[in-house]
């Protein structure tokens, strides 16, 4: 693994971002729209219920969800750019390693996620007097990291699928992040869902992260149990998906999908 | 010394219960500083060889060394000294020419990158495209950018797959000259695939003919042409006596490939038969106005191989 190659790939992602309006839109515009919708919805429900935790639940959920979503989608999107351009042929004939492609996308995604998060946190404070760090900076950073990790895990999974099956599965790059949203208790507590759904939800690190965040907002304390399970599940999934990606990459070289550039 | 050696290289593709051979025990070597052509009809295996050499495709069996290294084991060392250019590939379309070249230069760890980019854009005469996005370029312009990318790291081994397809004749000629000059100046080893026989004859020191995944012949263009024993003869006469002209020629058991009312084209082996045929035509009272003996070209070799005919 060479840092100069990782830098080169990050430079490419930077060029893509500044040259493509939709890459700036998905970093700033859509999260902003989400924040506005959830902010006004929260105010409306607060008026109805007089429940002060509504803002924490909805806005906290929406802001942290963008962390996971950006991390997950960015990786697939930047790799897909090479497929769309039929550039993968040239890229993979350089000394670049698949791990460098993953790491560069992770790091660039992290920068984009932090920018989005910063903007949303700032606007949340200005527009709705909502302090995302109200649960404690340390807690927010830890649970954000757990969400980022899962985003990268699914990004790696989708990237593996793209390498193996080409652009025909590109829909996963945009939709996969959302597939687990109903099971992740993003905007509602886990206890409010049916028992069978709770069992499924507990498999996803996102569930533990959002449960932990809500607990921190409500009590000001860290739910160590949630934190442990979020990172533990992240670690298992990361190892599994990393090997899945390497397997897909190996298969792609065997069947020639990279050379065919389909 | 050999820059590339390939021995018993095989590659198969599995489709349902059928195994298709893309390459069957292919062996050849490319000398350092040589321009080596891979020729053959579609599906012959030329691109498969390029893809395996560039690491985009895995081999089933066989041994490959590039610059005396195993590219599977010393991948980074080999790839740093190698580059590819394929007409059917593309660069990141949303990036400008300069941005693309900068990214590739950095991937290869090229020093003095600004200078290198300017130099390459200048020799390929595309300095005006520097700040243009790649997706708006014409095919010919993109190919020249791809060639700039191919030379960005000053490679010791350059693999070019159909890299002049889509270029205007004058640009193609210029590009060939640039590549040849570059190769002579830098001592670059170039493996070149093309369907353009004239181009291959002009550029390549040696050529391998491939057909259905196997190498049929290797040699210099001159050696390969000599492998064709037959020559094509065209005789034109005054008047329109097709039947008699054709039948006179056929008496000598030669293969008539085309005949019109006042013209016949046939193939002969050696030049011994030709005076006899001419004498016979004159004796029949026909007046010859032109005799054209065409030496076999590389294209004839290519076509005969593609048709599965004997040379």
Image: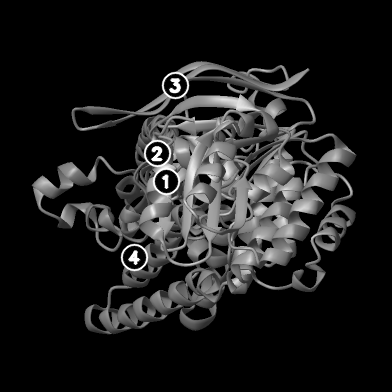
Circles 3 and 2: CB atoms closer than 8 Å: no
Q: What is the CA distance from the residue labelled 1 to the residue labelled 4?
A: 100 Å
- Which residue does the image show at 60% across and 64% down from the upper left? A16
Q: Are marks 3 and 1 on the same chain?
A: yes
* Residue A118: percent from left, percent from top: 57, 66
| Whether residue A146 can be seen here | no
Chain for disc number 4: A
Q: Nearer the viewer, mark 3 or mark 4?
A: 3
B225 on left or right of A225: right
Q: Nearer the viewer, residue B189 or A47?
A: B189
Which of B227/A84 is in front?
Answer: B227
Mark 4 crowdedness (10 Å alpha carbons): few <14, some 14-19, many ≥20: many
- Pointer 3 indicates a residue of which chain? B
Q: Nearer the viewer, mark 1 or mark 4?
A: 1
In-front residue for pair A261/A168: A261
Task: Assign the N terminus of chain B to one quadrant of the image.
Answer: top right
Dot 1 and dot 4 within a common chain: no
Separation (CA) of disc 1 from disc 2 = 5 Å
Q: Residue B248's mark?
A: 1
């Amino acid at each position: 693994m060479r840092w100069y190659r990782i830098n080169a790939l990050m430079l490419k992602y930077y060029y893509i971002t500044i040259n493509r309006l939709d890459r700036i839109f998905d970093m700033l515009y859509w999260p902003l729209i989400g924040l506005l919708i959830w902010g006004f919805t929260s105010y409306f429900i607060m008026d109805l219920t007089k429940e002060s935790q509504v803002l924490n639940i909805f806005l906290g959920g929406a802001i942290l969800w963008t962390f996971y979503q950006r991390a997950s989608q960015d990786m697939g999107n930047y790799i897909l750019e090479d497929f769309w351009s039929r550039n993968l042929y040239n890229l993979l004939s350089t000394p670049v390693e698949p791990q460098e492609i993953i790491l560069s996308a992770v790091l660039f995604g992290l920068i984009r996620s932090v920018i989005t998060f910063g903007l949303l946190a700032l606007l949340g404070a200005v527009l709705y007097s909502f302090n995302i760090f109200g649960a404690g900076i340390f807690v927010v950073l830890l649970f954000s990291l757990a969400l980022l990790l899962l985003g990268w895990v699914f990004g790696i999974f989708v990237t593996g699928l793209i390498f193996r099956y080409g652009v025909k599965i590109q829909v996963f790059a945009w939709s996969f992040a959302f597939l687990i949203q109903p099971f992740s208790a993003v905007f509602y507590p886990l206890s409010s869902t049916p028992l069978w759904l709770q069992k499924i939800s507990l498999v996803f690190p996102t569930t533990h992260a959002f449960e932990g965040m809500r607990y921190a907002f409500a009590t000001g304390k860290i739910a160590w149990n949630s934190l442990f399970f979020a990172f533990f599940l992240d670690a298992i999934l990361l190892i599994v998906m990393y090997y899945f990606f390497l397997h897909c990459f190996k298969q792609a070289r065997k069947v020639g999908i990279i050379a065919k550039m389909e | 010394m050999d820059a590339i050696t390939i021995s018993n290289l095989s590659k198969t593709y599995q489709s349902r219960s059928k195994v298709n051979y893309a390459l069957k025990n292919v062996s050849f070597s490319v000398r350092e500083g040589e321009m080596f052509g891979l020729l053959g009809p579609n599906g012959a295996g030329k691109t498969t060889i390029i893809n395996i050499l560039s690491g985009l495709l895995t081999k089933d069996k066989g041994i490959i060394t590039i610059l005396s290294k195993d590219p599977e084991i010393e991948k980074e060392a080999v790839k740093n000294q190698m580059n590819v250019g394929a007409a059917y590939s593309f660069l990141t379309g949303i990036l400008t020419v300069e941005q693309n070249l900068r990214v590739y230069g950095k991937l290869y760890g090229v020093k003095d990158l600004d200078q290198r980019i300017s130099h390459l854009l200048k020799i390929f005469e595309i300095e005006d495209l520097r700040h243009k996005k790649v997706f708006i370029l014409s095919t010919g312009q993109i190919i020249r950018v791809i060639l700039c990318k191919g030379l960005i790291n000053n490679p010791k081994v350059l693999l070019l797959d159909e890299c002049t397809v889509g270029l205007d004749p004058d640009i193609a000629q210029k590009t060939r000259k640039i590549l040849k000059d570059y190769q002579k100046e830098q001592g670059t080893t170039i493996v070149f695939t093309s369907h353009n026989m004239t181009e291959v004859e002009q550029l390549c020191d040696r050529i391998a003919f491939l057909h259905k995944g196997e190498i049929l012949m290797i040699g210099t263009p001159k050696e390969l042409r000599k492998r064709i024993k037959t020559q094509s003869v065209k005789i034109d006469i005054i008047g329109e006596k097709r039947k008699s002209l054709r039948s006179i020629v056929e008496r000598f058991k030669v293969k008539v490939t085309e005949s019109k009312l006042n013209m016949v084209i046939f193939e002969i082996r050696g030049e011994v038969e030709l005076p006899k045929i001419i004498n016979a035509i004159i004796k029949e009272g026909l007046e010859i106005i032109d005799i054209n003996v065409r030496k076999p070209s590389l294209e004839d070799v290519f076509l005969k191989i593609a048709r599965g005919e004997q040379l």
